[in-house]
Image (cartoon, rainbow, N blue to C red):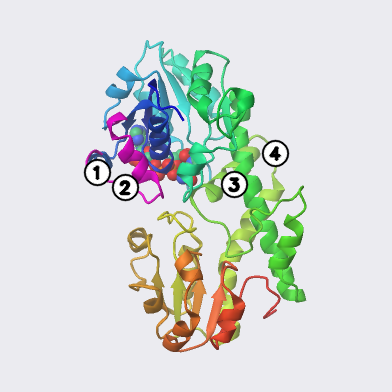
Amino acid sequence: MSAAQREPVGVIGTGYVGLVTAAGFAELGSDVYCVDIDAAKIERLRAGEIPIYEPGLGELLERNAERMHYATELMPALEHARLLFVAVGTPPTYSGDADLSAVHAVVEAMPSGDDGHALVMKSTVPCGTGANIKRILRERGKAFSYVSCPEFLKEGSAVGDFMHPDRVVIGDDRDWAGEAVTELYRPLLNEAHGGVGTGELVRTDIASAEMIKLAANAFLATKISFINEIANVCEALGADVVEVARGMGLDGRIGPKFLQAGLGYGGSCFTKDVSALKLLAGNSGYHFQLLNAVIEVNELQKRRVVSKLQRHLGDLAGKRVGLLGLAFKPNTDDMRGASSLVLAARLQAEGVHVRAYDPIAEDEARRLMPQLDYASGALDAVAGADAVVLVTEWPQFVELDWSEVAQVMRGTVVIDGRNALDPDAIATAGLTYEGIGRGVGA
Ligand SMILES: NC(=O)c1ccc[n+]([C@@H]2O[C@H](COP(=O)([O-])OP(=O)(O)OC[C@H]3O[C@@H](n4cnc5c(N)ncnc54)[C@H](O)[C@@H]3O)[C@@H](O)[C@H]2O)c1
């Protein structure tokens, strides 16, 4: 891919989305002016440190170090770039709505009387936010253009997702800004759209672009909750959800992805985006019934492991349980919405001594769960345990030597919370395997 000099861009917010987007555009040839209010983060970035764990991101930033500029003020970005990508957080409020305060802080910080810039919204925002921001900009006399360009990257494979997107969604008012964003993404688009990459272009209006992002996440969450319910029925009826999902997923209309039963979905996005869409629908007068069930199934799913353990061990008070993995999925240090948070709290409430290990997320986990007992490795986490629960399917747990595990455990129970382990290898080691929805232990 040509890295010829291209349009400079500003990126406001250097979290998972902002930093990957910034590094990606630098790789494509742009000078990138990053802005973050977190001064410590900007210092670390200037010093060549990567504040998050994301495979491949370090190499990308290092390779493009000369094109990357970091500041806590907006001015360098405003001076050098027309397109200002907004990638600040939109966490849930207590009510479950999206908290747009960081987005509005960015809007407020834009200078008035400007006519050469555009805000390009990467943050996930409720449908209607763009219209609202455009109104505010107008009222404040800020002649900014506005583009919705929702992000679909997945933590853990974010760099690859940026470079090889399924689609690029651009919602705009058919003005220069929409054209400029399309041009910026051009190399990543497929041949039909003049690129050399993989992405289909969805050029649409702002409200539809906003809705595409929320609907996509809600649909994926629905798929996960659906297969988890099938898993629970499989447990009652003696079927194996892994076989069922395989048989279902081979149907081209269904597809195999997001059909892995487990401890429920987590992460920063699904939980908050499903809730935000449900409330957004409610606020506009429509009761989105399906999403209520999706959310409830997911919450219950995180807790089902507790009853599995009770079935095996009886009263859990005083028992020792080793948790393998804490991050919401492998290859990330992100603990937001992780099933481990609920599971560990529930186990501790039952009087269990919980000892946990995660190869990358431990620092963040310690911040959120300071009361847990943290182990130095997988074997250390399971030593003396009555039961072990696989929470995050990091490859090193999948490849564990189960005869070694059997030697150090006090009990024999292995709950495979991600259906990622080899039941035969575990049984051969003399341990008792139970997955999620695998026809055992109804
Ligand atoms: N993480 C994901 O996998 C993912 C994927 C797709 C979309 N999204 C969406 O992208 C957005 C960002 O998510 P994230 O995970 O990167 O968040 P994050 O919390 O990792 O990063 C947000 C960054 O914005 C900074 N910030 C906050 N207010 C600011 C301001 N006024 N000016 C400058 N910087 C500011 C914060 O300091 C932080 O560094 C969210 O809306 C999220 O829903 C996230």
Tag 1 residue: 44
| Front tag of 3 and 4 | 3
Are discs 2 and 3 less than 8 Å apart at CB? Answer: no
Label 3 crowd (10 A; few <14 / some 14-19 / many >=20) = many
Q: Is mark 2 within 8 Å of ligand 1?
A: yes
Q: Earlier in the sequence, mark 4 or mark 1?
A: 1
The stretch of residues the image draws in magenta is 46-68
Label 4 crowd (10 A; few <14 / some 14-19 / many >=20) = few
Q: Give the CA separation, mark 3 to mark 4.
A: 15 Å
Q: Give the CA separation, mark 4 to mark 1.
A: 46 Å
Helix, strand or loop at disc 3? helix
Q: Is residue 412 visible?
A: yes
Label 2 crowd (10 A; few <14 / some 14-19 / many >=20) = some
Q: Is residue 65 rendered magenta in the image? A: yes
Q: Earlier in the sequence, mark 3 or mark 1?
A: 1
| Front tag of 2 and 4 | 2
Residue at 50% in and 53% down: 267
Tag 2 residue: 51
In-front residue for pair 334/211: 334
Are discs 1 and 2 less than 8 Å apart at CB? Answer: yes
Tag 3 residue: 274
Q: In the image, is residue 417 above or below residue 174?
A: below
Residue 369 screen position, x and y as percent: 37, 65
| Front tag of 2 and 3 | 2
Are discs 4 and 1 less than 8 Å apart at CB? Answer: no
Label 1 crowd (10 A; few <14 / some 14-19 / many >=20) = few
Tag 4 residue: 286
